[in-house]
Amino acid sequence: MLHHVSPTLVRSAAAAAHPVAIEDFLDSVGVEPHSRTGRGAFNIWGNAFPAEELPCGTLIEHDRVPFRFPPADGERPDHLRCRGQRIPLPAARADWIHVLGAAERRTEDSVLLEYADGGVRRQWLRLSDFWPQTGPRFGERLAFRTSAMLYPRHEQRTMSPSVWHQRVPVAVPDGLSALVLPHNPAMHLFALTLVEEQA
């Protein structure tokens, strides 16, 4: 279930959560208004999600996890492709890194979790296909499914692409300092949030 929320720190009986600032790492346009600017290219065919059906530029909550969904106008980058970026993380204890994203075909690759003491641990990021009418292959939860998919010259109302809610386990919850993404541009990320499970 999707809710709009206002705080940057959300506490519930289940978790404390800290959305991660990724604005400086956004590098691709994959969401456009129905009027289309023509810059959208979630894949090589120039497909894009319709902006009117996503919570662009807002702090939202999906399954009790808050995410900052980037603004999207078809001009500015609205998500990142995984190209080995090193993303600093909030100074917070974390048991999971929650992700809003999707892949071109189902894709899995390793990420590196860096710690303040110099330690590094490897984990897996697995994302299912954004392509319409495909289901989750890695146990993700569906975050969004739009009613249409945009093409460079038309809008296809019989195709409904997806954004998935996935999570990456954090084996050592204390001292996490950065997330290093894989060199895999088929993996697209819209938002990241650190989550600490409550005892």
Image: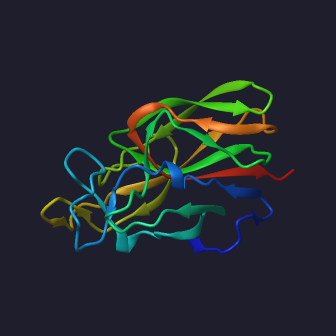
Specify whether 91 is left or right of 153: right
Specify whether 106 is left or right of 179: left
Percent coordinates x, y for residue 101 in the rendering: 46, 50
Q: Residue furthest right?
A: 199
Instruction: Residue at 69% x, 25% y: name it.
Output: 120
Percent coordinates x, y for residue 142 in the rendering: 47, 57
Q: Residue furthest front?
A: 24
Percent coordinates x, y for residue 36 in the rendering: 23, 68
Specify whether 94 is left or right of 110: right
The front one of 6 and 103 is 6
Q: Is residue 143 above or below residue 87?
A: below
Q: Is residue 152 above or below residue 81?
A: below
Residue 151: tell me if it is visible. yes
Q: How is the image coloured?
A: rainbow
Instruction: Residue at 58% x, 68% y: name it.
Output: 60
Instruction: Residue at 78% x, 39% y: name it.
Output: 173
Q: Residue furthest left?
A: 153
Is the N terminus in the top left, top right, bottom left or bottom right quadrant? bottom right
Residue 1: tell me if it is visible. no
Q: How many marks?
A: 0
**Residue 72 placement: quadrant:** bottom left
Specify whether 6 is left or right of 188: right
**Residue 13 placement: quadrant:** bottom right
Instruction: Residue at 66% x, 32% y: name it.
Output: 113
Q: Is residue 44 above or below residue 1?
A: above
Percent coordinates x, y for residue 71 in the rendering: 45, 67
